[in-house]
Amino acid sequence: MGSRASTLLREEEIEEIKKETGFSHSQITRLYSRFTSLDKGENGFLGRIIKIPESPMCRRVVVSFREDQVNFKGFMRTLAHFRPIEDNEKNKNPPTSEPLNSRTNKLLFAFRLYDLDRDDKISRDELLQVLRMMVGVNISDDQLGSIADRTIQEADTNGDNCISFQEFIKVLEKVDVEQKMSIRFLH
Amino acid sequence: MGPRWTSALLLCLLMVASSLANEAPAHETSASGGNQTSTGHGEAAPITTLPIVTWKWHHVSTPYLVALWILVSWLCKLVIEANHHVTTYIPESALLICLGFLLGGMIWGADKVQTFKLTPTVFFFYLLPQIILDSGYAMPNKLFFTNMGGILIHAIIGTCWNAATLGLSLWGCHKGGAMGDIDIGLLQYLLFGSLLAAVDPVAVIAVFEQVHVNEVLFIMVFGESLLNDGVTVVLFNVFDAFVSLGGGAIDAKEIVKGIISFFVVAFGGSLVGFVFGLLISLLTRCTKNIQIIEPGFIFVLGYLAYLTAEMLSLSAILSVMFCGMCCQKYINSNMDERSVQTVRSALKVFANGSETIIFVFLGISAIDKSIWVWNTGFILLTLFFILVYRFIGVFVLTWMMNRFRLVPISLVDQVIMGYGGLRGAVAYGLAVLLDETRIKEKNLMISTTLIVVYFTVIFQGITMKPLVQWLKVKRAALVELSLIEKVQNKVFDHALIAIEDISGQIGHNYMRDKWRNFEEKWMSWFLLKSSARKKQDRLFNVFHELNLQDAMEYVTEGERRGSLDFIRNENAFVDFKKKFDEDFAEAMPDIMADMIQFDGCNVVFLYRGDPVPSVSLEMHEQNLRGLRQAEEINAHHLLEQHLYKGRKQHRHKFSRSHFSINQDENEVQEIFQRTMRSRLESFKSGKMGVAPPKTITKHTKREQQPKMPNGKNRSYYSGDEDFEFSEGDSASGYDASFPTRVSYRTGAGIENPAFMPDVDPSSPMHIPPWLADAELEVSPVAPSQRAQVRLPWMPGHLHRLSSLRTSPRSGDSVQEGDEQLPPPPPPPPRHDRDDNHL
């Protein structure tokens, strides 16, 4: 299957993805085979529902792929957010566009995980949804609500009871996002 | 002044100790007779008359000396810690060793022979276990397992590398003639190498804890130092056996057996620890009725884990460490809050205490002419090789590891890892264990080991801090718990798991997720009390802690401002506790126990307060009903626990198995009613116009109350005038109940002070809380109201609380609460100042 997948991927496409996302050639082909195995319809697009949503957060990530139909490029673009920042990238400091795995982009991705309605604000309800995904059944709605309230209060500086992206960045200033939102992709 | 005084005391003690020590050998003969000491005493001098007192030094000498030495060592630490300007440059462990030199010199001067030494038995059986148990118990598990790979590589391969290269290089140099005429063979060199190979946990903790390097670096060095014990013990045993077998008898079979024994020892030890850890967790599930000795189980079973592993000749250090690591989570949630605190602090006492003793005795042991054999070549070469090979090993292994790490270990960190290869008491203990009949140069090895230990602990220890600063090593950030960060970290974790899922690789996060699921499903079910299982969520715990912290700040601020009554009941707990501590701490230690009890109650109670965590100051946004419920419980609880103790006698019950407070229902009831009656009377007399203007002031004040957070508190006792003072009175009633207080001048306690004129608002500000209660007896309510008008002013704080007052919902709830009260008056002017900060 892997070999079939890689044959379907044209060399120039690989180059293009490589440039945009920074994945290596072998990573791209490996992920392509994964992509095709997830792709039920075998039409090069992931539909809204794909096979893996084991955890609710997983589904959330898939939703944040943005387009209803995710093609391989979009898939790779999403994954690229989770690539660790490498030393040579830091030094090279590409003047063109910000790489997808920069701190701001990682944060933006994390922000979008909450912000479902795309109004650039995390409302209490959106936060509650995410919290509910992560905590067990032992916590009552009231408790969760108060947690959400407090969380928002910690971040909220302008008093609109929502967390904007600026507030989000500010509050997570000290968190080592570069490390915490990176995984090692297999080669 | 202080240090000088303590050092004088120390000197006196030393004199006593050494003079006693002088006598000790003299009595040795009679003491060695075992238990005949007391009878022997009778025989030696047949009594003609009944002696009133007799001098029985030899009877108590051993435990007495032990206790005295512990005291002396700890006093050393006290002296050292009193000099902060010294400890900032020189680590404590180095100073302790130096003081040890001094003490050793004194004993040597008095006895001409070193009477006290660190013996392997004492070290391995009585000093080491608690240190390791403590570090296991306090181990940050997630961090440890995240870096497990690196730690294992360093602990296993690194240690073998150190041992082999040191042994071989020394042997090579010997063959080259660098050491002159000494009788050491290749196997003995390897044995020596293996005992010096391991980085010592005690030394590492002592130095690294003061340096505060970043957590990954710390866990790498510290984890390695703990885990490499297994390797050292095996290597040591294997080479020890080889030495006694002799070179000829070693064939491939023996070597394979050696390798197998390594795995058995290391994993067997860990397994023993794991089993004991589970055992402890299981036990704490059912210790509800014996809470007093609950913490004891951890110590006893931990020690048993150590001894069991030792008995099976497995790695005891690994065993006790894993025991601590396994049980930490479960016992912390199974046991009562107090017991957890006890375990924590007691472990720290033991660990820190024995660490101190170890270092002092490492110093003392040096002052002994009989062990010192000098061989310049051997000693210097050993030092040199140890340093060099440690660095080479770290660099090579980290280079290999970095290819597989998400966050590579930087070169600077590697240097510190290499430089952090401190050797310590474990090496010394092993060196002393060497068999003199087989190893001719045992004393040379001991003295070399000692020099290596001193060099690494003192020299490297002192230079570590400047080096860390000079290389600008990433330090550990002082983490402040913030809920959103915690939430976000969790989101990151979950997102990573999701991404690993999507990209279809079985990585680190995926494994962790699987383990967590397994753990939650099975282990928790098996090992946790059902009540404890419910409180397992980390997020909620953080939330809870933050709220507690807020409450504490709130109280502190209130105390600073001179009164506490502005806060709601549950915060008053904290206040009471504090007040009591101040008053009675020296006099009645049992009251302290009671205090702990209160604390416990408080915490337990908070959980009982579900679904509204009652300490939360933001809870005002909750619906009023929930609030009322919580406050009802609050008020009830407060009354029950604190309010009216017997005013004549606080009947002090003593129980060995419970912390008890006076819960005699009748007494409480009676006092309550009487106090209430008298209050009512004085209230009436007040209303009759004894002091009309005061009443008026009172009323205006009262009308302002609903504006404040605990205004709702008041409104809840709707219309019942008498009850309104319960809060303020709680303080005074409480005071009156204590026998040591001068103040039960009034029969049913307390002529009603409620309508006393207001005290000058400026003066109580300076009255500390423990004095404030005296003032409260005179006018318990007045300050409370003043305080209500004035919320503690703390910008950051108020910011968090802001929504209480600004959000429409909280406004509503106040409105609802006000139904029975006059319409809310305009807010006092101070509010405006507060509001500016919102």
Image (cartoon, coloured by chain):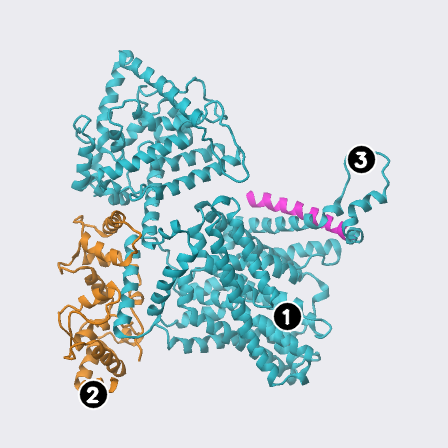
Q: Nearer the viewer, mark 1 or mark 3?
A: 3
Q: Which residue is mark 2?
A: A7
Q: Which residue corresponds to the image point at 80% horizontal and 45% vertical from the top-left?
A: B39
Colour representing chain A: orange
Q: Which residue corresponds to the image point at 59% horizontal and 63% vertical from the top-left?
A: B425
Residue bounds of the magenta highlight: B1-25
Q: Which residue is mark 1?
A: B448
Would you say the magenta stretch is mainly helix, strand or loop? helix
Instruction: Judge left or right: residue B279 versus residue B123.
Output: left
Q: Which residue is mark 3?
A: B51
Q: Alpha-carbon distance for marks 1 and 2?
A: 66 Å
Residue B100 vs B655, above or below: the answer is: below
Q: Which residue corresponds to the image point at 63% horizontal and 56% vertical from the top-left?
A: B100
Q: Secondary structure at mark 1?
A: helix
Colour representing chain B: cyan
Crowd band around label 2 with a 10 angstrom C-alpha radius: few (<14), some (14–19), many (20+): few
Crowd band around label 3 with a 10 angstrom C-alpha radius: few (<14), some (14–19), many (20+): few
Q: Nearer the viewer, mark 1 or mark 2?
A: 2
Kind of residue sitting beneath label 3: Pro
- Quadrant of res B751: top left
Membership of B817 in magenta stretch: no
Q: Position of residue B687 (x, y in %)?
A: 27, 14
Q: Secondary structure at mark 2?
A: helix
Crowd band around label 1 with a 10 angstrom C-alpha radius: few (<14), some (14–19), many (20+): many
Q: Are marks 3 and 2 on the same chain?
A: no
Q: Chain of mark 2?
A: A
Q: Position of residue A184 (x, y in %)?
A: 31, 73
